Amino acid sequence: MVSIKEIIKLEKENPDKILVHDEGLFYRLYNKSAFWWYDNIKPFKLNHKFVKTIDGYLVSMGFPASKWDEYKNRIKSNWISEIKEVQESVFVFKCNNILNNEQVNERIKDMVQKSNTYSPKKNEIDGIIIDRVKTYPLANKTPFETMQFVAELQSMYKTKNQ
């Protein structure tokens, strides 16, 4: 399995290519590759999380390995003719309309903002609080910002229990 740092490095080294990672039962795509797949192949759910080792957010999406041949054939018939394995379990293909780094960062920023402004139902609040705590970029926040964040979570919890 490829580390997150290696994934980011591969994405940067291949700005005009889509990378698909074979991770056993699932195939996964990250950042620009995930956005391209969402826009062109199938809009699977995009996930994002803050990752300390890269000091930023990572966007990912996945699909069952059993669907790879179907998607590979669609890619070959619509965009390209060749899919190569650049290293063990990482497939790459070149295509058009790939987002540049600035566009990827803007979409990630939008995702993060939307997830922070979502108005949940009462029964969803516990999961949201847990997710917010898990993805909170503590290393990049001041003590005051962290206190505000905790106060916001407390307010969400109190509202839920009223």
Image: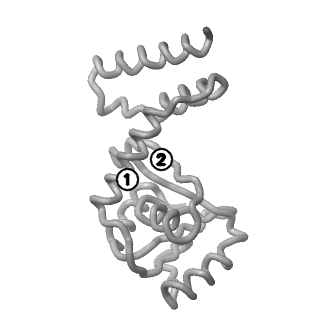
Q: Residue at x 47, y 19 (%)?
A: 153
Above-or-below relation of 76 to 134: below
Q: Residue at x 30, y 61 (%)?
A: 101
Quadrant assignment for the N terminus: bottom right
As helix, strand or loop, the secondary structure at mark 1 comes to: helix
Q: Which residue is mark 1?
A: 107
Above-or-below relation of 129 to 53: above
Q: Residue at x 53, y 74 (%)?
A: 88
Query: Marks 2 and 1, Cα distance to the nearest angstrom?
Result: 11 Å
Above-or-below relation of 90 to 76: above
Residue 43 position within the rendered picture, expressed as x and y whole percent measured from the top left: 57, 61
User: Counting other residues with Cα less than 10 Å from the Cα at mark 2, is it few (<14), some (14-19), or many (20 or more)?
Assistant: some
Amino acid type at mark 1:
Arg
Label tally: 2
Query: First in sequence: mark 2 or mark 1?
Result: 2
| Depth check, front residue: 16 or 23 | 16
Residue 82 position within the rendered picture, expressed as x and y whole percent measured from the top left: 51, 89
Q: Is residue 19 left or right of residue 54?
A: right
Q: Is residue 37 left or right of residue 24?
A: left
Q: Which residue is mark 2?
A: 48
The tag on residue 10 is none
Q: Is residue 123 left or right of residue 103?
A: right
Amino acid type at mark 2:
His
Q: Residue at x 53, y 53 (%)?
A: 46
| Depth check, front residue: 45 or 12 | 45
Above-or-below relation of 73 to 105: below
| Depth check, front residue: 114 or 126 | 114
Residue 77 position within the rendered picture, expressed as x and y whole percent measured from the top left: 57, 88
Foreground: disc 2 or disc 1? 1
Residue 152 position within the rendered picture, expressed as x and y whole percent measured from the top left: 43, 18
